[in-house]
């Protein structure tokens, strides 16, 4: 394929891959448009339309659905000048479709801009063979030969599977322009994590979504499927989450610890409201937040310092310095970070203004 990737293109042709979240709220779709010049801002990329009835986003008799570019990345598969165009989805009547939560998040980011919200997102995920069973797990329902504690940050084929995909994904995300921060192998065999951060405002969930797209594309070229399911191998095996680390200018300033405590109180009051929006599969997240495998129970809010069995964890160094950030450990691996970041802003700082 490399031969074709390297073919010179006519000077006025570039390929733009439009990427959007489909009606499932977790899967991504893409299609390509040839443009005559490279768009370096979302405004420079034209709106486009697609058949929303084939993606669970419209009915067949009213199917023209609109893609509005919202963030631009360099295409790591074809390389610059070709681009990835992350899009918001709007129905024919101009209203955002049900799975378009970006506007909700962006309005809050804009309204609270002076507070300089920072996010750090830890995306955990699992690699599956195309038959749906864990990558490298014994066929016929078998389990990995090693105990889980050896797979976390593990080295060696007995402990981890799929490292080439992790490696390609990291390089591709950095090339694309994501604030890509790091990776590690997770507790369960064939599951891993990457981090986006520390990033200001809406760029964090934008980068997270495009990095999910890049992950699916890299894995696809290896014949591997990616799942963000919170409990892909059932209740007896570890779960996968997306911890959201969050801070504001006030939290990061001297005496910020007091404000962090105030925010935690508000998060406690709004616990169940947040839980409703912290997964595309609430039952799956309930299974994950069992109180086992470094989680706190789904229904009960808790917080603590250096404690991983809580809803909100404060790192020891934050308590010691008296300022810093909080870690929300509740969101599921398959959450929509637009919803989680938006809710953190809304609950801690207040709704977007009139
Ligand atoms: P752990 O697995 O122990 O929770 P990670 O290193 O995977 O730790 O994640 C820590 C996250 O905290 C990173 O994503 C980082 O961007 C984020 N972070 C660090 N400082 C801040 C801050 N001041 N505001 C928001 N997020 C932060
Ligand atoms: Mn057609
Ligand atoms: Mn982590
Ligand atoms: Mn982790
Ligand atoms: Mn974490």
Image (cartoon, rainbow, N blue to C red):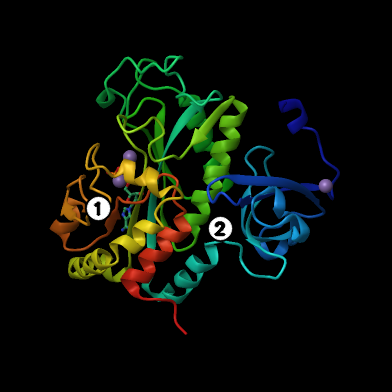
Q: Residue furthest left?
A: 320
Return the x and y of residue 62 as percentages of the image width and height. 75, 61
Return the x and y of residue 41 as percentages of the image width and height. 65, 61
Splitting the image into 4 quarters, where does residue 68 fall? Answer: bottom right
Return the x and y of residue 199 as percentages of the image width and height. 43, 57
Pick the residue in front: 97 or 75: 97
The residue labelled by disc 2 is: 99
The residue located at (32%, 41%) in the rendering is 288
The residue located at (62%, 28%) in the rendering is 221
Q: Is residue 67 rendered to the left or right of residue 185? A: right
Say if residue 55 shows up in the picture: yes
Q: CA distance from mark 2 to mark 1?
A: 25 Å
Residue 311, labelled with which disc? 1
Q: Is residue 178 rendered to the left or right of residue 330? A: right
Label 1 crowd (10 A; few <14 / some 14-19 / many >=20): many
The residue located at (19%, 57%) in the rendering is 318
Disc on the earlier residue, 2 or 1: 2
Nearer the viewer's eye, disc 2 or disc 1?
A: 2
Say if residue 178 shows up in the picture: no
């Amino acid at each position: 394929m490399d031969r074709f990737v390297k073919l010179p293109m006519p000077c006025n042709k570039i390929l733009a891959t439009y990427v959007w979240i489909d009606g499932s709220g977790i899967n991504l779709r893409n299609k390509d448009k040839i443009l005559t010049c490279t768009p370096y801002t979302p405004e420079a990329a034209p709106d486009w339309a697609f058949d929303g009835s084939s993606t669970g986003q419209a009915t067949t008799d009213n199917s023209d659905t609109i893609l509005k570019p919202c963030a631009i990345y360099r295409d790591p598969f074809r390389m610059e000048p070709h681009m990835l165009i992350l899009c918001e989805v709007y129905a024919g009547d101009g209203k955002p479709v049900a799975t378009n939560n970006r506007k909700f998040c962006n309005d809050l980011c804009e309204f609270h801009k002076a507070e300089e919200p920072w996010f750090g997102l830890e995306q955990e995920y699992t690699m599956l063979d195309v038959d749906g069973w864990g990558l490298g797990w014994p066929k016929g329902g078998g389990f990995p030969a090693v105990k889980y504690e050896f797979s976390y940050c593990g080295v060696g084929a007995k402990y981890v599977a799929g490292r080439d995909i992790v490696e390609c994904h990291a390089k591709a995300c950095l090339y694309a322009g994501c604030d890509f921060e790091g990776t590690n192998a997770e507790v369960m065999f064939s599951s891993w994590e990457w981090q986006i951060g520390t990033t200001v405002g809406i760029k964090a969930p934008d980068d997270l979504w495009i990095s999910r797209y890049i992950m699916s594309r890299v894995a696809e070229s290896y014949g591997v499927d990616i799942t963000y399911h919170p409990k892909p191998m059932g209740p007896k095996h570890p779960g996968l989450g997306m911890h959201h680390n969050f801070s504001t200018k006030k939290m990061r300033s001297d005496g910020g610890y007091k404000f962090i405590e105030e925010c935690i109180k508000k998060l406690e009051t709004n616990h169940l409201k947040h839980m409703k929006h912290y997964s595309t599969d609430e039952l799956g997240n309930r299974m994950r937040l069992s109180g086992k495998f470094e989680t706190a129970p789904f229904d009960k809010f808790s917080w603590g310092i250096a404690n991983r069995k809580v809803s909100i964890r404060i790192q020891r160094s934050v308590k010691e310095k008296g300022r810093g950030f909080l870690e929300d450990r509740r969101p599921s691996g398959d959450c929509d970070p637009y919803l989680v970041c938006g809710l953190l802003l809304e609950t801690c700082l207040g709704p977007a203004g009139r």
